[in-house]
Amino acid sequence: MVLRIQSEVVSGVAGEPIRVVPTGAALGATVKGVDLKDLHDAMFARIMQAWHDYSVLLFRDQTVTDQELMAFSRRLGDFDWAPIQETGRRFVEGLPEIFIVSNVKVNGEPIGGLGDGESVWHTDMSYLDVPPKASILYSLEVPVTGGNTSFCTMYGLYEALPARLKDRIAGLKIKHDGTYTSGGYVRQGVTATDDPRTSPGAVHPLACTHPESGHRMLYLGRRRNAYITGLELADSEALLDELWEFASRPDFTWEHVWRVGDLVLWDNRCTMHRRDAFDPHSRRIMHRTQVKGEGRPL
Ligand code: SIN
């Protein structure tokens, strides 16, 4: 499991100590006593430590502008620009660093991506050779119910695999499909295909080591059109089904119920996430930034 190091006390808002409260689930913690607009270096270091310990951090009651969201994100590294999804531009006008996740339409045009349907388990942009290392999602409007986001620990999944499966996947590589979004939409400029052997994407090891924590983890990306290179398609499908059976177990996940002002920072290297569908008549608006990875998953 993830190593949790005792940390020194760091003061946050109004001199109160920053508190990191674990969710009690397999991953995730709430960080209390922090205003992300106003972080000194010791606070940021404490947040980074908590991020490495828990993989997903929730900050409640934040009030950040897009510029402030970007300023916080920039402390983690360079930006990966927002992907262009579905039918065209889906980012904040003039700020290509900020992707809008929303079902809201203005003059019949969606202002963001992913709509109101389910978004299936995935790692963001793992179809790239160097996927983003972090994603940061800030909620501006949320439905009364639904649209919850769940996270899954890839450390926990790897640890839970029987030795037989760990041996089986050692040295194997998986193609992460770049055809479909987690909402099932075909990406801009890509020809739809359901043949995992020929679909576009990046090939990564099935079991990787996290570059900072040094922990081993499973690296699945998403199920649709995934392909374990070098295997017959039927064998690849059977092995992937066996691995994905672990990913759907609740003991490896934490479900977040959003409130307006929540900001969630997740380590995109060692987690996957999914989102529930929600009432199409309600509004959900989230702004997301992504921070570039520092190398290929190894
Ligand atoms: C995402 O997959 O990045 C969006 C998740 C969400 O809408 O909660």
Image (spheres, rainbow, N blue to C red):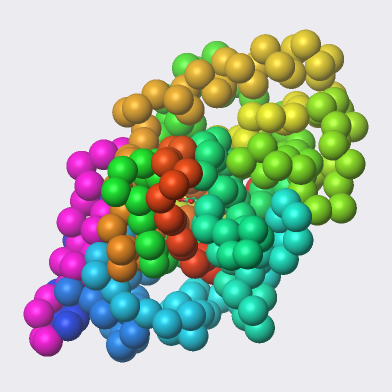
Horizontal side, residue 201 vs residue 46: left or right: right
Q: In the rendered image of this protein, does residue 72 appear above or below residue 124?
A: below
- How many numbered marks have been drawn onto this rendered protein structure? 0
Residue found at x 9% / y 80% = 16
Image vertical order of residue 245 relative to residue 52, above or below: above
Residue furthest out toward the front: 107
Residue 27 lies, in percent from the top left, at: 33, 44
Q: Quadrant of the N terminus?
A: top left
Above or below 263: residue 127:
above
Residue 55 appearing in the image: no
Q: Position of residue 35 (x, y in %)?
A: 26, 80
In this view, the residue in front, 1 or 201, is 201
Work out whether residue 15 or residue 90 is closer to the camera in this orientation and state it. Answer: 90
Would residue 210 be counted in the magenta stretch?
no
Q: Is residue 133 above or below residue 273?
A: below
Left or right: residue 13 versus residue 70 is left
Q: Is residue 25 magenta?
A: yes
Task: Indicate left or right for 210 with 39 as reference.
Answer: right
Could you tell me which residue is drawn at 39 percent across and 67 percent down?
140
- The answer to which of 88 and 30 lies nearer the viewer is 88
Quarter of image, res 237 = top right
- Residue 38 occupies which quadrant of the picture? bottom left
Q: Residue at x 77, y 49 (%)?
A: 187
Q: Residue at x 47, y 56 (%)?
A: 267
Q: Is residue 156 visible?
A: yes
The boundaries of the magenta stretch are 14-32
x and y percentages locating residue 134 in the rendered image = 52, 62
Residue 280 % position (x, y): 47, 44
